[in-house]
């Protein structure tokens, strides 16, 4: 976790922190927004802008009008005397993966480990070339912090053919010891979240509780969510209301119309923030709004969730936990050992407006949901 900056010369401290971050990201990687950096460092957007300007002047970062701020060059080469962690970042990463990359890089720096990240277009020849480049730079430990579920076979073949032990974000057949989390533990946080959110909405008095997710039958996490959700609904003697939708807006619009008949009685647990926000948009189109007409909770606590209208209640991913264990696993594998997480952290629910729980959570309510930390957040910060 990045500590808030001191009061004196904040813009210089922002400059120093962002300079370190820039060194860990691949060239042309997109930087966090000024607003997100301001929230991270507990300062104003103007302070962030002043700190970034120094890096712009040095050519380390480049602003593109309407697109954002990007890494233009690295200011210095790492020293070979330092421990070095090679991070292979899939070029089609999503917002979750990008935040995880930043967390891994920052955690490495805190441990005096020099992170070096590269983009990989695939897990074939390009990934092998990038891996060879990292090895020439002096990296001895490696991690792939994220990859899509449909790339599992490619990752399996790449790691086996490369003959390098690489820390992975999930168990892969034949490479179970390379996962940062023990196979018997993988997926438990997801199951735990679904169970707790089912109880949460039940305590709030919702008559119907639905599960919303992507139409991705090979997604392991989704499979575990479905099993956990069905189990919770069975124990609560509720009807199962599960819908998996493709990415097209039309499909979500049709779902909103179907679910509109449960207006005022429906609560929705979403696979992630993206699907929650898409449902909110579809509901708005037909004049329905959260939390009055339906209630919803997302997952991952993305920047978009804080600035939605109304701000989205969401489960915060524990990036500190994941990044710490990805690094521990990578360092252990480099030494011929296995070090995997065997316990799971508590779930953190960031309570905003869309779930209907704002202002209703007291100590007695919290006592009924051990394992779920509930934090109030108004969202939409200035």
Image (cartoon, rainbow, N blue to C red):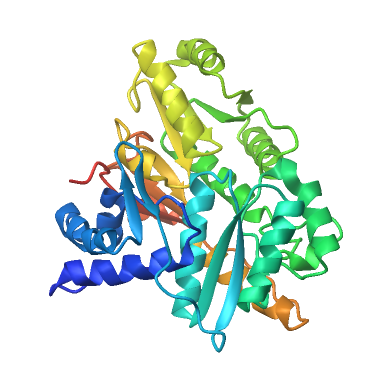
Q: Quadrant of residue 3?
A: bottom left
Q: Quadrant of residue 118?
A: bottom right
Number of numbered tags placed on the structure image = 0
Residue 58, how many percent across, how many down? 29, 64
Q: Is residue 149 above or below residue 238?
A: below
**Residue located at (30% from left, 32% from top):** 310
**Residue located at (46% from left, 26% from top):** 278
Q: Is residue 226 above or below residue 13?
A: above
Pick the quarter of the image with the N terminus: bottom left
The one nearer the camera, 127 or 202, is 127
Task: Specify whether residue 343 is in view.
Answer: yes
Task: Specify whether residue 318 is in view.
Answer: no
**Residue located at (12% from left, 75% from top):** 8
Q: Is residue 213 left or right of residue 153?
A: left
Residue 6, how many percent across, how many down? 19, 74
Residue 171, how many percent across, how many down? 75, 58
Residue 283, how many percent across, how many down? 41, 17
Q: Is residue 337 above or below residue 355?
A: below
For this orientation, the residue located farthest to the left is: 8
**Residue located at (26% from left, 49% from top):** 35
Q: Is residue 370 above or below residue 251?
A: below
The one nearer the camera, 67 or 222, is 67
Q: Is residue 367 left or right of residue 86?
A: left
């Amino acid at each position: 976790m990045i500590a808030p900056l001191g009061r004196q010369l904040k813009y210089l401290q922002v400059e120093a922190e962002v300079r370190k971050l820039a060194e860990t990201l691949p060239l042309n990687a997109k930087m966090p927004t000024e607003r997100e950096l301001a929230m991270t460092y507990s300062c104003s957007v103007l302070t962030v802008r002043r700190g970034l300007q120094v890096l712009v002047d040095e050519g380390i970062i480049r602003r593109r009008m309407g697109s954002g701020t990007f890494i233009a060059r690295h200011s210095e080469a790492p020293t070979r005397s330092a421990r070095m962690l090679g991070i292979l970042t899939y070029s089609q990463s999503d917002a979750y993966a990008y935040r995880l990359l930043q967390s891994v890089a920052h955690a490495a720096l805190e441990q005096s480990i020099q992170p070096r990240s590269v983009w990989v277009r695939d897990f074939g020849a390009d990934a092998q070339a990038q891996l060879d480049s990292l090895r020439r730079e002096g990296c001895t430990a490696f991690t792939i912090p994220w990859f899509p579920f449909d790339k599992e076979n490619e990752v399996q073949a790449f790691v086996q053919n490369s003959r390098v032990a690489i820390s992975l974000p999930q168990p892969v057949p034949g490479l179970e010891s390379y996962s940062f989390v023990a196979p018997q533990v993988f997926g438990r946080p997801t199951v735990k979240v679904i169970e707790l959110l089912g109880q949460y909405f039940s305590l709030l008095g919702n008559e119907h509780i639905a599960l919303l997710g992507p139409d991705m039958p090979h997604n392991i996490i989704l499979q575990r969510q479905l099993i956990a959700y069905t189990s919770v609904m069975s124990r609560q003697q509720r009807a199962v209301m599960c819908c998996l939708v493709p990415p097209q807006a039309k499909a979500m619009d049709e779902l909103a119309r179907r679910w509109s008949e449960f207006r005022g009685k429906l609560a929705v647990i979403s696979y992630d923030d993206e699907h929650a926000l898409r449902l909110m948009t579809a509901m708005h189109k037909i004049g329905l709004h959260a939390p009055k007409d339906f209630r919803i909770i997302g997952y991952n606590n993305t920047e978009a969730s804080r600035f939605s209208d109304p701000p989205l209640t969401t489960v915060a991913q524990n990036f500190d936990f994941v990044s710490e264990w990805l690094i521990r696993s990578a360092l252990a594998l480099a030494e011929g050992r296995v070090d995997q997480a065997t316990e799971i952290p508590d779930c953190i629910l960031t309570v905003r407006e869309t779930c209907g729980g704002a202002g209703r959570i007291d100590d007695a309510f919290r006592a009924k949901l051990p394992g779920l930390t509930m934090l109030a957040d108004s969202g939409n910060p200035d």
